[in-house]
Amino acid sequence: MDQLVTLGEFLRSCRSRLVPDEVGVPRTGRRRVSGLRREELAQLAGMSVDYYTRLEQGRARTASPAVLDSLAAALRLDDAERAHLFDLAGDHRPRHQEPGRALQQVDPTARRLLETLDSAYSPAFVLGRHTDVLAGNRLAYALITDFATLAPRERNQARFVFLDPYARELYSDWDTVAADTAAMLRMEAGRRPADRELGDLIGELSVHSADFRDLWADQRVVERTSGTKAYHHPVVGDLTVSYQAMALAGREDQTLFVYTTQSGSADETALRLLAAWKSSVDLGRSRESEPSPPAGQRGHLAQDADSPPSGV
């Protein structure tokens, strides 16, 4: 991924989203572009049109922090977008590909925390680099998908969202989930331009998902910290959870996501029913000594009510 080219694409995308009237630019004559013209943005940012044009065309090798601050203010970037701008403009020297990294390991203490949250009816999981699912508790896997039964390469939230048909059935607002997932990857790509594994993942999603290609072209970035997520679960029906994302201390690029519901709500009842269902299924399998369903079956619901959906 050429950072200079990507920087230009990001600037053009942000400029096209600005409404002239809202940023104090009068509408004069017929406008052939959406958003602001280059000269209008350059004037707002206090720089020459020539210099801004070179930035947008990927021909400017450097940009000072003061210039970036001015651009961020003129483009009205939020915190995540501003950080992404600085990432893209940070270091344009040619870099070697990063060497292959060892698999990320989740600390035993964090795993015990996942188990504790499970008993509190709180789905929880740990995401690593590239939205890899490194660990999760039983309730999270019952609510979303049993990543533990998948091949290591397939234990990835972005692959699940864009490549597993079941995800579209599971998420009540799949469009929002997909857009946020693509924006998270865009943010990480700005931070790690030489990350070969990340580039491979983005390439795979671009080849196999038209939705991802469209969302990637939007140049949107986001860093999720908290919010809500709605599910349409085949076992317990509709429920909405609140989530909080927390960085795990001492572990690079590992984020703990914890889902909670309001005490006494129908959503809490749904999670309790899901936990009971999961326990009964696991107990039945243990008694019958039956192997788990094949990990490769994705995106199809189970054939009977006593078996979990393969994509849960």
Image: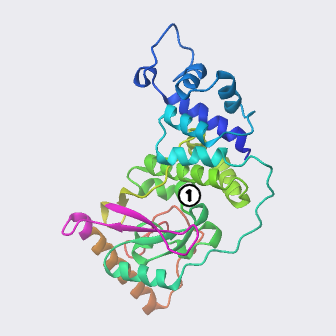
Q: Nearer the viewer, residue 81 or 128?
A: 81
- At a point 43% along the width and 55% down the height, the residue shown is 169
Q: Which of 12 and 65 is in front in this view?
A: 65
Q: Identify the residue under disc 1.
A: 158
Q: Is residue 137 above or below residue 183?
A: below
Quarter holding residue 275: bottom left
- At a point 66% along the width and 44% down the height, the residue shown is 89
Residue that protrudes farthest toward the top in the picture = 29
Q: In this view, does 257 lie above or below 105?
A: above
* Colour treatment of the image: rainbow
Q: Where is residue 223 in the image (x, y as percent from the top left)?
A: 49, 54
- At a point 39% along the width and 69% down the height, the residue shown is 258
Quarter holding residue 199: bottom right
SS type, badge 1:
helix
Q: Position of residue 145 (x, y in %)?
A: 48, 68
Q: Where is residue 173 in the image (x, y as percent from the top left)?
A: 39, 49
Queried whether the magenta region covers residue 243, the answer comes back as yes
Q: Nearer the viewer, residue 237 or 55?
A: 55
Q: Is residue 67 left or right of residue 176?
A: right
Q: What's the residue type where badge 1 is placed?
A: Ala
- At a point 51% along the width and 85% down the height, the residue shown is 108
Specify start and end residues of the magenta stretch as a single range. 241-269
Q: How crowded is mark 1: few (under 14 residues within 10 Å), some or many (20 or more)?
A: many
